[in-house]
Image (cartoon, helix red, strand yellow):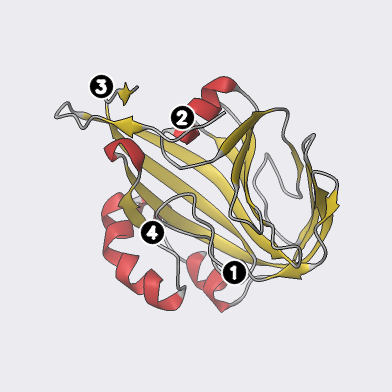
Amino acid sequence: MRTSRTFRRSTAPAERRRFFGHILGAGSTSGVRCVVGHWVTTPFGPFADVMVEDDEGWRTLLAPTDEIAEFVCGTYEFDEVVIAPVEVDAPGRDGVVTGPGRWSVRTPDLALDLQVAGRPLLGQALRLLPLAAAASPVCCRAVDPVARLVLPGVRTYGTALAGRHEAYGALDLHRVVDLRGSWRGRSLGVLTPVEPPVRFGFSSTPATPACVRVVTTIDEQADAKPVE
């Protein structure tokens, strides 16, 4: 189904929602780029979703429930939405990825196997940040200009659909070094940078394939309504 929507802005007090988990971004020689969301603590409970942009620029959301799809589509833009089980098997404790290992992502349309490796210097630096500082939208907004310089295409603060303000607080980062799989029966080939950048929202994932542990904060107007 189509998910492009226009929302009325509101002067009502904003509602804040926080999502703790991981965002893994990877490209492939097929031209398909995938962004996997592996969410541990959210207003919807634990879940996983995948955003896929193919070599022709077609953007697909794979989401496990209508409720989650509706919320995600109110924040990001897609050409197609598929409601289906999204299963992610990743190393770690209590859903938190703590080190290198194999990731397996399965949906009816997507089979994805990835190797997550060690931390680069940036990942080591992120681990030193206090959670309160890293998760603060004020801090995310302050470091946004630096993030743009260090990681072209990446934003840590911006405005999404429906007037929602979104902040990405990075807590850790691991390299992704291998990818195998298929998208709708077509082989993905092998791992490449995430180029061109994905176009789901105001920010792409890092061009260098990576798994980032994040706190995503979304502030939205409580009575924003879609205009049909």
**Badge 4: residue crowd in 10 Å (few <14, some 14–19, many ≥20):** many
- Determine the CA span between mark 3 and mark 2: 14 Å
Q: Which of 151 and 123 is in front in this view?
A: 151
What amino acid does circle 4 point to? Answer: Thr
Q: Quadrant of the N terminus?
A: top right
Asked if residue 39 is positioned above or below residue 225 in the image, the reply reads below
- Determine the CA span between mark 3 and mark 4: 25 Å
Residue at image mark 3: 223
State the count of labels. Answer: 4
Secondary structure beneath disc 4? loop
Q: Position of residue 161 (x, y in %)?
A: 35, 40
Residue 87, can we see it? Answer: yes
Residue at image mark 1: 195
- Determine the CA span between mark 1 and mark 3: 37 Å
Residue at x 46% of width, y 42% of height: 77
Q: In which quarter of the image is the C terminus?
A: top left
